[in-house]
């Protein structure tokens, strides 16, 4: 597990019989070269001792939010900043509920709330507790926050029952964490540009021409690029989405601004143009707000074709240029024509007339058309999953 070497892992141990497994987990992570700092909740101390944890981790064990000996250092801040990754193992139903609600009444929950690092949860609880609707809702909420879950597993439990709820074995957890760090380095030698969202072409200072793009698919692609180690720049039109930690964010309004920022961001190994750039712009933007009248005639000019411009300029062209095609009819015909006319390598097409996905939805269904005439369909799934599929395909080309 070479990707664990020199990684800093903050392990939060919660109160359950599975807490004893955390000792083996510490040993494995240390054996593979990781630095481990541990938070032991009050409940966890009923099952294992701080002395056992500090002996294995060779680090001070943190237990209290208000520790007069160390709170001057603000442990909940310093620990969250120190770590490359935070792992909660075992995670009880109680702690999962607190994390999902943003309750921060102890050191463990406060650290998570103060952290911007990747967080993994390894649950351990009775099968009925795991299957309870409230736990399912809490897990769903945490997944939407970006937390990842490792397990639980199915098997015999300490309470004598059988079912899903066992903490995943330490060896499997260690491998999972190793694979995460491996993934985060796959694109470390590559630079990526992603465009997302709509553009705005102004009529006057108040009114503009735009479209329904939410930017969600482009943001998910940029996030997946970053998680795979790419040096990622996201050039985005106006959206309601939160900035992505670790991604260079460039905000623009018009198609002209998006092209200018794209050119300034080159060279790049891959450019993915998922933004819905307005096809037209107004011949001239009024300095003052236009007054209401019975009729208003507006002259539209063809807007800049960013995808075509970048694809056809050999001195600027990234190794891999990918465009998007939002269609309401003749999906394949229109997408293949776009692929050929714009000289890009792939076109990722979706049918925006289907109201079950696309635009503001978290789901999508796309068809990838390749320059070699092949195509591949990714059936309806979350935009985050589609983004990961796309990034994996990009890596297979660049590597």
Image: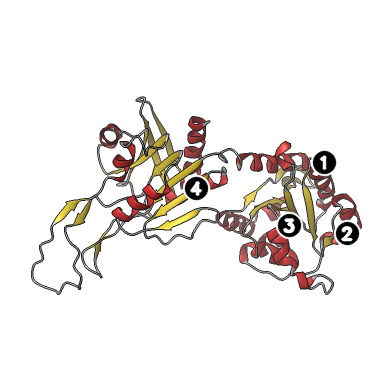
Gap between marks 2 and 4 measured at Cα: 41 Å
Q: Residue visible at 71% across and 58% down?
A: 82
Name the outermost residue toward the front.
315
SS type, badge 4: strand
For marks 3 and 4, give the one nearer the viewer: 4
Q: Pick whichever of labels 3 and 4 is earlier in the sequence.
A: 3
Does the image show residue 117? yes
The answer to the question of whether label 2 and label 4 lie on touching residues, with beta carbons closer than 8 A, is: no
Q: Pick whichever of labels 4 and 1 is earlier in the sequence.
A: 1
Q: Pick whichever of labels 2 and 1 is earlier in the sequence.
A: 1
SS type, badge 2: helix
Task: Please state if 100 lies on the left or on the right of 125 as rendered.
Answer: left
Which of the two residues, 130 or 139, is positioned nearer the viewer here? 139
User: Residue 262: where, in percent of width, then height?
Assistant: 38, 49
Gap between marks 1 and 3 measured at Cα: 26 Å
Q: Check disc 1 and report the residue beneath it.
A: 31
Task: Please state if 32 lies on the left or on the right of 236 as rendered.
Answer: right
Q: Check disc 2 and report the residue beneath it.
A: 50
Which of the two residues, 192 or 278, is positioned nearer the viewer here? 192
Q: Pick whichever of labels 1 and 3 is earlier in the sequence.
A: 1
Does the image show residue 89? no
For marks 2 and 4, give the one nearer the viewer: 4
For marks 1 and 3, give the one nearer the viewer: 1
Q: Pick whichever of labels 3 and 2 is earlier in the sequence.
A: 2
User: Residue 1: where, in percent of width, then height?
Assistant: 73, 36
For marks 4 and 1, give the one nearer the viewer: 4
Q: Check disc 4 and report the residue beneath it.
A: 232
Above or below for 376 versus 35 = above
Q: Check disc 3 and report the residue beneath it.
A: 92
Could you tell me how many numbered marks the image carries?
4
């Amino acid at each position: 597990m070479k990707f664990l070497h020199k990684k800093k892992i903050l392990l939060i141990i919660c109160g359950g019989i599975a807490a004893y497994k955390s000792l083996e987990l510490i040993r494995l992570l240390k054996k593979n070269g990781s630095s481990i700092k541990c938070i032991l909740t009050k409940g966890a101390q009923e099952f294992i001792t701080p002395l056992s944890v500090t002996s294995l981790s060779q680090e001070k064990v943190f237990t209290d939010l208000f520790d007069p000996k160390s709170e001057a250092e603000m442990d909940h801040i310093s620990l969250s900043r120190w770590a490359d990754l935070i792992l909660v193992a075992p995670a009880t139903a109680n702690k999962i509920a607190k994390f999902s609600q943003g309750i921060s009444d102890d050191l463990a929950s406060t650290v998570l709330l103060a952290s911007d690092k990747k967080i993994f949860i390894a649950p351990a609880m009775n099968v009925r507790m795991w299957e309870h609707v409230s736990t399912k809702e809490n897990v769903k909420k945490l997944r939407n926050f970006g937390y990842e879950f490792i397990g639980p597993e199915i098997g015999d439990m300490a309470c004598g029952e059988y079912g899903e709820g066992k903490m995943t074995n330490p060896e499997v957890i260690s491998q999972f964490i190793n694979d995460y760090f491996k993934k985060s380095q796959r694109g470390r030698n590559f630079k990526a540009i992603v465009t997302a969202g709509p553009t705005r072409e102004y009529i006057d200072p108040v009114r503009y021409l735009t479209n329904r793009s939410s930017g969600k698919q482009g943001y998910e692609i940029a996030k997946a690029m970053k998680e795979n180690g790419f040096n990622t720049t996201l050039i985005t039109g106006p959206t309601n989405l939160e900035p992505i930690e670790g991604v260079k964010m460039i905000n623009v309004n018009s198609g002209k601004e998006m092209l200018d920022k794209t050119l300034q961001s080159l060279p790049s190994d891959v450019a993915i143009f998922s933004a819905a750039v307005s096809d037209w712009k107004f011949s001239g933007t009024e300095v003052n707000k236009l007054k209401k009248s019975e009729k208003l005639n507006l002259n539209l000019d063809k807007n800049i074709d960013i995808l075509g411009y970048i694809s056809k300029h050999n001195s600027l062209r990234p190794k891999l240029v990918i465009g998007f095609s939002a269609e309401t009819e003749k999906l394949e015909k229109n997408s293949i024509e776009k692929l050929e006319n714009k000289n890009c390598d792939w076109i990722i097409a979706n049918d925006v007339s289907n109201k079950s996905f696309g635009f503001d939805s978290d789901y999508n269904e796309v068809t990838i058309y390749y320059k070699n005439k092949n195509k591949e369909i990714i059936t309806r799934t979350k935009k985050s999953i589609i983004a990961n599929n796309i990034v994996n395909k990009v890596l297979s080309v660049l590597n």
